[in-house]
Amino acid sequence: MNAFALILRRDLKIAFRRWGELATPLIFFVIVASLFPLALSPEAYQLRDAGPGFLWIAALLSSLLALDGLFRTDVQDGSMEQLALSPAPLALIVLAKTLAHWLVSGVPLIALAPFLALSFYLPLEALPVLVGALALATPTLSVLAALGAALTVSIRGGGAIIGLLVLPLTAPVLIFGTRATSLAIHGEPAVGPLYLLAAFAVLAISLGPLACAAALRVGLE
Amino acid sequence: MPQHYAWAWNKDLIVGLVRWFHSLASPPHFYRLAQRLSPWLIATSVVLIVAGTYGGLVLAPPDYLQGDGFRIIYVHVPSAYVGMLAYVMMAGAAGIGFIWRIKLAHAVAVSVAPVGASFTFLALVTGAVWGKPMWGTYWEWADARLVFELLLLFLFLGYMVLHAAFDDRDKADRISAILAAVGVINVPIIHYSVEWWSTLHQGPTIARLDAPAITLDMLVPLLVMILGFTLYFAWLVTRRLQGEVLERERQARWVQRLAAGEPE
């Protein structure tokens, strides 16, 4: 557990020192979301219908954008090998790194989403569900993206492949995330999809780091 | 001591089975076996596919709702089935290769992937061709199975791209095996998510094929076609696997003797 806290602190510190990298996915998220009404139409009814789905796609893309550096820099400067040799289980270290990544990329995204949603004319009552759905879904997205990063860590310029590997796997999260949001917009209870999102998160957090650790071990050889 | 004999017999059987599996995993043994087996596979599959085509196009009665349009089922369903079978086989082989470090199992996974992707693609194309006269549109997002097939195709492509991205084949085998294993957990989730999603949407109101019980003279050609496609798939995989094994073992003496045309 000590190793977990140490890695978490270290990764957060590194992330805040490179604040440019930290901000890029968020700015990307906001820019893409602001371009959307220009591409579709400024009509309120259209934006309200398509807005939630669009927010989810933008969140998905920006969570992938941030991931390439998650393990790559550590592998390149050799610190990942030291971490893999340390007595702490590699899966736990991976979990700490993923959590750090979620804290600096997922949480700001959750905080930004309601403002973008308001600009898409989403009703105020739907916002808690949107925030809740994002809070339950972004951990799964972070784990999946960490998996993509771990699989491609020893490929030169592997960043582009991550999307291809990970995006099909995110389909269930996307389905139930948008489902919860649009149920809330129409004033219906959105508990069902939220429960499912929580189940996906539990599954991803418990099994994902093991797969990441296995992939990192092969990648380090 | 009957019990004693029974145990001895069982032990012989188990040891024999293990040896057989073990010998199957040896590349030269597999190669020889495949060489003998593949003409039978392709011959049987051609016979079955020809018979199934005749049964499906000529003997089966037209559907009371879809007329002759339903007959594309004889290509669509077998290819969709083989596509899913291929994914299970790819992931299973990759998992076996990863856990027990059997090289031939990795070769199986690598050989299955493009074949499975092709059959999945065929299922999508035939589904689109079928959709046009029946649903009035080539693509129907509300149909869960169509969307699922599309995602399955992406999973195949992801596996192939990841495997191709590595220079070191051993690394490529093992890393893409992890992706395939993750896919196995995800495929049922994706399947049921898509299904649930589409039932929450307004389902297609035009009659679906699975609702009425299918009559026997329609069903028998379909089963024959499924068996024929499966054998054809097995033949394709066997031939690809032979090529894959030759390439992987190109430094081995048995391959060089084979290339020189020497008897074993």
Image: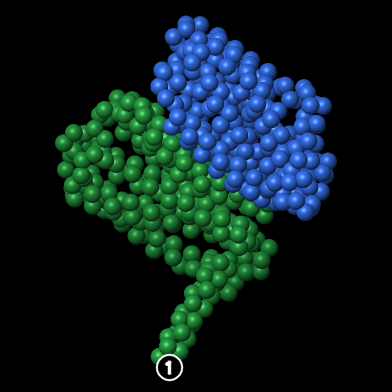
**Is residue B121 visible in the rendered structure shown here?**
no
Q: Colour of chain B?
A: green
Q: Residues within 10 Å of mark 1 (few under 14, many from 20)?
A: few
Q: Which residue is mark 1?
A: B1
Identity of the residue drawn at 58% across and 61% down: B104
Q: How is this picture coloured?
A: by chain
- Residue sticking out furthest to the bottom: B1
The quarter of the image holding the C terminus of chain B is bottom right
Which of B123/A60 is in front? A60
Where in the figure is residue A168, as x and y percent of width and height?
Answer: 53, 36
Q: Is residue B124 above or below residue B102?
A: above
**Is residue B141 visible in the rendered structure shown here?**
yes
- Residue sticking out furthest to the top: A43
Where in the figure is residue A188, as x and y percent of width and height?
Answer: 40, 22
Chain letter of the blue region: A
The quarter of the image holding the N terminus of chain B is bottom left
